Amino acid sequence: MTTSQTLAGNTGWRLKIDGWTLGTAAVSTAVMLPIVAVIILAFTPGDDIWGHLTSTVLPLYITTTVQLMIGVGTGTFFIGVGGAWLVTIYRFPGKRFFEWALLLPMAMPAYVIAYVYTDVLEYAGPVQGALRHLFGWTSIRQYWFPEIRSLGGAVSMMTLVLYPYVYLLARAAFLEQSVGVLEASRVLGRSQWQSFYSVALPLARPAIVIGLSLVLMETLNDFGTVDFFAVYTFTLGIFDVWMNMSNIAGAAQLASLMLLFVIALVLAERFARRKKRFHQTTTTYKNLPGYKLGSIKGLLATVVCTLPVVLGFALPSIVLATYAVIHFDGDVVVQVIQTAGNSLLLSGTAALIAVIVAIFMAYGVRIKGGPVLKVMTRIAALGYAVPGSVLAVGVIAVLASLDNSIDGFMRQHFGFSSGLLFSGTVAAVIFGYLVRFLALSFGTVEASLTKITPSMDGAARTLGHGPFATLRRVHLPLMKTSILTAGMLVFVDGMKELPLTIILRPFNFQTLATYVHQFASDEQLGEASLAALAIVGTGIIPVILLSYAIRKSRPGNEIA
Amino acid sequence: MKGLLIHGVSHAYGDHKVLDKVAVVVPAGELVCLLGPSGCGKSTLLRLAAGLEVLQEGSIVIDDVTVASNTVHMEPEKRRIGFMFQDYALFPHLSVLDNVIFGMVGSAPAKARSRAMEMLDQVDMVNQASKYPHMLSGGQQQRIALARALAPEPKLLLLDEPFSGLDTNMRARIREETLGVLKQFGVATLMVTHDPEEAMFMADRIKILGSDGRILQAARPHEIYYHPKHEFVAKMFGLMNRFDGVVSHAQVQTPLGSVAAPDMADGTKVQVLIRPEGIVLESHEDASGTAVELLSTHLLGHDNIVRVRLASGSSSELYVRVHHAFEPELALGIKAIIDPDYAFVFPLDGEESGSSSLVKAAQ
């Protein structure tokens, strides 16, 4: 037998163009384009405003942004990780309730609670009014009251609604940990607290870092809150330069500087993750210990878990509901239902596509490896870091050039003009959401894929299943929970998305978020309250599903 | 030829060469063991044969079809190979039965199912068919993994440390069962292990892979044990007694008598390695040999380990395995001689020479 004989009948050429490599590269490129467009735009010669910016507002933008990030990062870390640890490991009054209730603020956009708390806490609001009444004060000069429309206020608002990202990922990580390692740590002489600090926390670190990086990216992106509170972050600066100075290149230049922040963030996350690749060391699961807390400690745990839920969800919801009842109006109801349909369409489609794309990319990298694919997917997942408003510029640039080329092709070959096919359509908004939120689905799917040991792939492949069949029959079922998580993260964020939607939406097309923004920023919270409640309401359903799925996903854990 | 033919395979991770021009032939019906220390590239060879890793140099042929060479890379799912992973890699979301059915791509569902049940019957796991992997013990998981690998009737079976996850009692039993099943199926099998005893028990032939990625010796188990061609091979099976010496007239003198060193030039510095069972102790009036002092005896069950010291005053210990209850008559003194079947002479290349000493197992 010679080699030449066998070559004729062989099934696989090493050099054949590989579908997975090509597909992954193509998808990554499509998602990358708007980001690349922004960077190109930033380096396109135009009015160079650097000199002007550095001498005036740039130092303010940088310090404010850094302060905001530190504040929100610290706050979400403590609430998210602490809450996750409490409800996962201990038994105390209300534990079962808090398991899912702690996720509720996720349904609440930062700008919505900013509107609500401003309304409640401002001089004319009920709190200060009640204080004045109680103590007989008659003017602002007689007492001190924290100013909600401030940096501290923005930190509080964002912490209250963003901590669930950290909570969600930390809790999933704690649940996936084998209780065996915790018991080993206890037996080796570490206390509960030491075990948490030296075993559980390091094991959960990749997940927590992902959660924190999501939080910080959201913080960088926020427009509604900082706009309303006049907190001069980068994003607000970009809007200022773009909207008020009509300087798109300048806005893109600011954005590219901001991108450095984010790249640092992403690299830190990647580094932390690469350093430790945790595979589950044991396949045997046991029920979680459920340490019972004494009455004082238990009560304390209950209070600690109650605060974020009340402040981040219950109180603002009650305020909104009260307003909705007071300002009830049939016309508003019809409008809100129609708007809600639009929001569902956009977010649902975007979530579906984002999950499919994420699976495709993460799995492509897993089976094909290679530094080029890896870098491409990393860049594609950077969309989350780019502020929605700036990303919108990239999307507009890409779609306009696509429309123009199709139009040109049609004119040349068929003699008619196809006009603007994508620009200013629902598809443009969905594409924008996809670019923006791919990091959410990709990060989640990839993290979950990493946890599947490579021998699973080997087993399926040697048992006669190709890469696609292996994905369908082994990885997808094993990643079910994470895929659901990924979809829900994108969905909820889509429902809340504001700046991107404002810019990319078709003419007169309202989503719940744009509707709320339009009225609430005009201090007409009454008119906006029903739509805001609708955003919050749609956000709750996935939150409950999510919590249930996480609990169920753990083998050996009884379903409560 | 039916079976596996690996020719001239070299593989490196970066600068680290783990396989160096390795050749392995596994005819149908034979079980070949690749024995070597951890991290020596044994598993890499299996992954190359399965197509889970892309070949860098050489060729791999299965049943007369080149599945990997410089120009060919057949995808693993096309190779019809059974692979049993060290961690078994059972799919946690599928029942035992569905795990076994998984590989029978293209069979009608009813047929696949009945074949899977047959396989489960072979490994005595029929009544566990509807359970999930996490509900099974390690030994049961191992059997399922074996059944799953064999169910699609592979042309070649690859076993990666198949018994390393089992406790000692279980291991001996499962090993025997597995061997029975494999013999019955008559499939060409390449197994990787770091445990020499396991290799001796399972293999028709053993290939010993050194830590430099080269095959040091390939032979039947008997040959490997009684005629190790390399110091490394001799040391794989546990502690050895060692004397250093110089060849003279094709002989080496040791304190326990001379050992033949054919084919070695006079004046060559050598080490003589003697297995613990290669030193014979006697204590009766006619006993010949060198006088030794008893230090201690340790009953291991079916045999004894006896520690002795040369009576001549040399401080070094000898380690002797005795196959019967050892009750010396101390009054007569104990004499030791070498059984030449268990003594091996290897040149001392460059290594500094000591006197006699115990040598730890190579792994």
Image: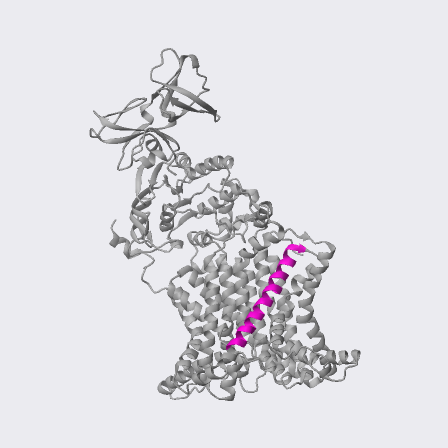
Q: Position of residue B201 (x, y in %)?
A: 41, 34
Q: Position of residue B315 (x, y in %)?
A: 37, 25
Q: Is A404 or B337 nearer to us in this picture?
A: B337
Across the whole image, how many numbered discs are drawn on residues? 0
Q: Position of residue A524 (x, y in %)?
A: 67, 85
Residue farthest along the top direction in this orientation: B285
Q: Quadrant of the C terminus of chain B?
A: top left
Taking the image as shown, residue B179 lies to the left or right of residue B265, namely: right
Q: Is A450 or A16 nearer to us in this picture?
A: A450
Image position of B226 with respect to A204: above or below? above
| Residue A360 seen in render | no
Image position of B212 with respect to A323: above or below? above
In this picture, which residue range is highlighted in magenta? A62-90
Q: Position of residue A261 (x, y in %)?
A: 47, 72
| Residue A501 seen in render | yes
Residue farthest along the front direction in this orientation: A142
Taking the spot 58% from the left edge, 45% from the top edge, the residue there is A188
Taking the image as shown, residue B249 lies to the left or right of residue B278, namely: left
Q: Main secondary structure of the magenta part?
A: helix
- Is residue A87 one of those drawn in magenta? yes
- Is residue A180 one of those drawn in magenta? no
Which picture quadrant has residue B93?
Answer: bottom right
